[in-house]
Amino acid sequence: GGNLVIRHGGETKNIDLSKGSEDNFFATAFYADCEHELQPVTEGWRLALVYNLVLPSSPSMSLPSAENLTSQALQLRHLVREWPFPESKTARGYLLEHKYTETNLSFQNLK
């Protein structure tokens, strides 16, 4: 759920990740020099898996395809549905790695 805002080169895109989220899995990708903001979830849950994607250039390598991720996405959906979510609305998370700017570095903005 929630919105993802991506900014680059004076352009801003606001992506609503809540529409159809009851039955769908969403994936987004953008370049590392894009500024992004995950806005608060107002209802439900958000699971964010963040990767740094690196594609070495090779003429023999085929380009990645979202179709190749279908079975993994279905497995992930099944696992998330089986999680015993607590009744409490307290946040739980593990801070891994994120590039914060000085303007968004605060406890309330930790992702």
Image (cartoon, helix red, strand yellow):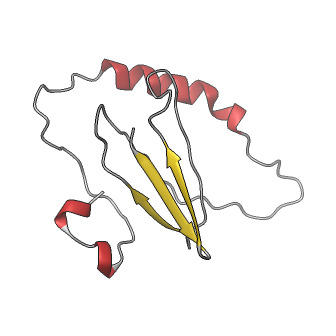
Position in image of residue 28 (x %, y %): 56, 48
Up-down: is 70 above or below 109? Answer: above
Up-down: is 49 above or below 81? Answer: below
| Residue drawn 60% across the image and 65% down it | 31
Front one among 26 and 2: 2
Front one among 105 and 70: 105
Position in image of residue 106 (x %, y %): 21, 70
Quadrant in the rendering for residue 103: bottom left
**Residue 106 visible in the snapshot:** yes
Residue projecting furthest to the right: 59
Q: Quadrant of the C terminus?
A: bottom left
Position in image of residue 101 (x %, y %): 36, 77
| Residue drawn 79% across the image and 49% down it | 63
> For this view, does 59 lie left or right of residue 111?
right
| Residue drawn 20% across the image and 61% down it | 108
Tag count in the figure? 0
> For this view, does 5 lie left or right of residue 105?
right
| Residue drawn 47% across the image and 40% down it | 17
Q: Quadrant of the N terminus?
A: top left
Up-down: is 87 above or below 104? Answer: above
Up-down: is 52 above or below 106? Answer: above
Residue projecting furthest to the bottom: 102
**Residue 50 visible in the snapshot:** no
> For this view, does 107 lie left or right of residue 96?
left
Position in image of residue 48 (x %, y %): 40, 45
